[in-house]
Image (cartoon, grey):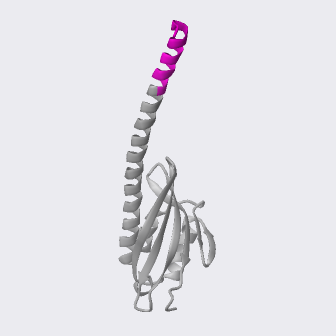
């Protein structure tokens, strides 16, 4: 091989090596970042569950984006804005007995980019008047203060006994 052929191949090999090592570092960084983000979102959901189980709807709402642009879709239709979502929760669950004890389970995380995540899961309320449960999809967005739910779609799923 001539020097004219070897030099371009050598330069290409160096650039390919640099590119692949950068991609490996980026993947590790992204994976570590995703784990930190997953932990931050899981913490918010844990705080919501604890607040709900204490009968504290206002603290439960801290997980949501306090904005008129927040959206909630459920069996009652679409609610827009933090105040509307809070009012909906207070109307549907007026006291601790109606609220019961909340469990989230089967959480699945899908990161849609560095500042957005889709979280799928199941919810269950243990109540003296009868248990209920269903599924949810939450869109989280990284905001200046931290991750917040910007959209919630929650559906009730009837059990076979119902």
Outermost residue toward the top?
3
109 over 143 or under it: above or below: below
Q: 133 or 99: which is nearer to us?
A: 133
Give x and y (percent) for residue 115: 50, 49
Q: Is 146 included in the stretch rendered in magenta?
A: no
Residue 117 higher or lower than 107, as above or below: above
Residue located at (44% from left, 51% from top) = 145
Identify whether 71 is placed above or below 55. above
Please report the residue visible at 50 percent of the width from the left and 78 percent of the height from the top: 134
x, y percent for residue 52: 40, 75
Check the image and report above or below for 15 versus 78. Answer: above
For the view shown, which residue lies furthest in the front direction? 1
Magenta-colored stretch includes residue 13:
yes
- Residue range of the region highlighted in magenta in the rendering: 1-16
Q: Which is the main secondary structure of the residues drawn in magenta?
A: helix
Q: Residue visible at 42% across and 50% down? A: 34
- Of 9 and 124, which appears nearest the observer? 9
Q: Relative to residue 67, is residue 22 drawn left or right? A: left
Foreground residue among 33 and 40: 33
Q: Could you say where residue 105 lies in the image, as x and y percent from the top left?
A: 41, 71
Across and down, in percent, residue 89 comes to 51, 76
- The residue furthest right is 77
Horizontal side of residue 76 vs 86, given as left or right? right
Residue placed at 44% from the left, 26% from the top? 17
**Across the whole image, how many numbered discs are drawn on residues?**
0
């Amino acid at each position: 091989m001539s020097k004219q052929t070897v030099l371009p191949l050598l330069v290409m090999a160096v650039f390919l090596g640099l590119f692949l090592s950068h991609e490996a570092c980026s993947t590790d960084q992204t994976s570590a970042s995703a784990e930190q983000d997953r932990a931050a979102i899981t913490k918010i959901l844990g705080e919501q569950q604890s607040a709900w189980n204490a009968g504290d709807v206002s603290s439960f709402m801290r997980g949501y984006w306090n904005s008129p642009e927040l959206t909630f879709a459920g069996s009652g239709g679409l609610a827009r804005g933090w105040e509307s979502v809070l009012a909906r929760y207070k109307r549907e669950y007026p006291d601790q007995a109606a609220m019961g004890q909340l469990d989230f389970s089967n959480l699945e995380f899908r990161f849609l980019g560095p500042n957005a995540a889709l979280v799928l899961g199941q919810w269950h309320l243990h109540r003296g008047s009868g248990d209920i449960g269903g599924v949810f999809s939450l869109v989280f967005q990284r905001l200046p203060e931290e991750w917040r739910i910007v959209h919630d779609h929650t559906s009730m799923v009837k059990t076979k006994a119902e």
